[in-house]
Image (cartoon, rainbow, N blue to C red):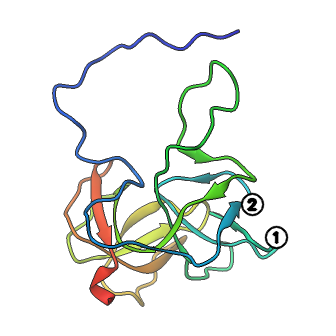
């Protein structure tokens, strides 16, 4: 049996946010129907309905459809194998907390600017970069209705929201 790694560092300050966490006390809106993960989906990413499995969602978006929502962070996902560490994956077949509106923390892979639209990768629904307009074409991405509420550099945390639409 594998043992968990011993803690190697201690942070001086609490993290500003973690992917998928609620970023404010503003209202959030979830999908009216519950969904299950059609494959492993990542917390802090966007999902679409799985066309092959009714009632399931996936992060893979080959058709370029507008995502139905954002996977919010719940601390209910199991560690599947003893000795495995915590993961940000929702395992296939488990319930997914899909939010259609709200303010959330995401980790960006490229620098973003407040006010840009959120562009997500078609391969896994992760947030890639910002787009100037919602109709802008971003390679290998779908531009969502969410906007960045904060600036962030590559690898940093940013706040996204679509509450401006409400």
Res 110 quadrant in image: bottom left
Mark 2 or mark 1: name the one nearer the start of the chain.
Answer: 2
In x, y percent, where is residue 153? 24, 53
Name above or below for residue 77 compared with residue 109.
above
Q: Residue at x 44, y 10 (%)?
A: 6
Name above or below for residue 121 compared with residue 137.
above
**Left or right position of 123 against 158:** right
Name above or below for residue 109 compared with residue 15.
below
Q: Residue at x 44, y 79 (%)?
A: 144
Q: Residue at x 78, y 76 (%)?
A: 51
The front one of 1 and 111 is 1
In x, y percent, where is residue 8? 35, 13
In x, y percent, where is residue 92? 73, 51
Pointer 2 with pointer 1, Cβ within 8 A: yes
Quadrant that contains the N terminus:
top right
Q: Identify residue for label 2.
A: 38
The front one of 75 and 9 is 75
**Left or right position of 86 against 25:** right
> Counting other residues with Cα less than 10 Å from the Cα at mark 2, is it few (<14), some (14-19), or many (20 or more)?
many
Label 2 vs label 1: CA separation?
Answer: 7 Å
Give SS at disc 1.
loop
Q: Count the marks: how many?
A: 2
Q: Residue at x 49, y 50 (%)?
A: 74
> Counting other residues with Cα less than 10 Å from the Cα at mark 1, is it few (<14), some (14-19), or many (20 or more)?
few
Q: Which mark is residue 161?
A: none
Res 20 quadrant in image: bottom left
Quadrant that contains the C terminus:
bottom left
Give SS at disc 2.
loop
Q: Which mark is residue 53?
A: 1
């Amino acid at each position: 049996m594998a043992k968990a790694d011993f803690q190697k560092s201690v942070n001086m300050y609490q993290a500003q946010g973690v992917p998928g966490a609620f970023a404010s006390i503003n209202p959030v809106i979830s999908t009216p129907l519950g969904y299950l993960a059609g494959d492993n989906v990542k917390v802090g990413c966007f999902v679409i309905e799985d066309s092959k499995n009714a009632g399931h969602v996936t992060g893979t978006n080959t058709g370029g459809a507008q995502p139905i929502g954002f996977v919010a962070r719940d601390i209910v996902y199991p560690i599947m194998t003893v000795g495995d560490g915590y993961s940000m994956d929702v395992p296939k077949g488990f319930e997914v907390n899909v939010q259609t509106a709200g303010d959330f923390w995401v980790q960006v892979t490229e620098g973003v600017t407040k006010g840009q639209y959120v562009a997500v990768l078609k391969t896994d629904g992760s947030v890639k970069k910002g787009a100037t307009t919602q109709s802008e074409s971003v390679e290998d991405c779908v531009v969502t209705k969410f906007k960045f509420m904060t600036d962030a550099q590559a690898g940093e945390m940013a706040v996204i929201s679509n509450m401006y639409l409400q």
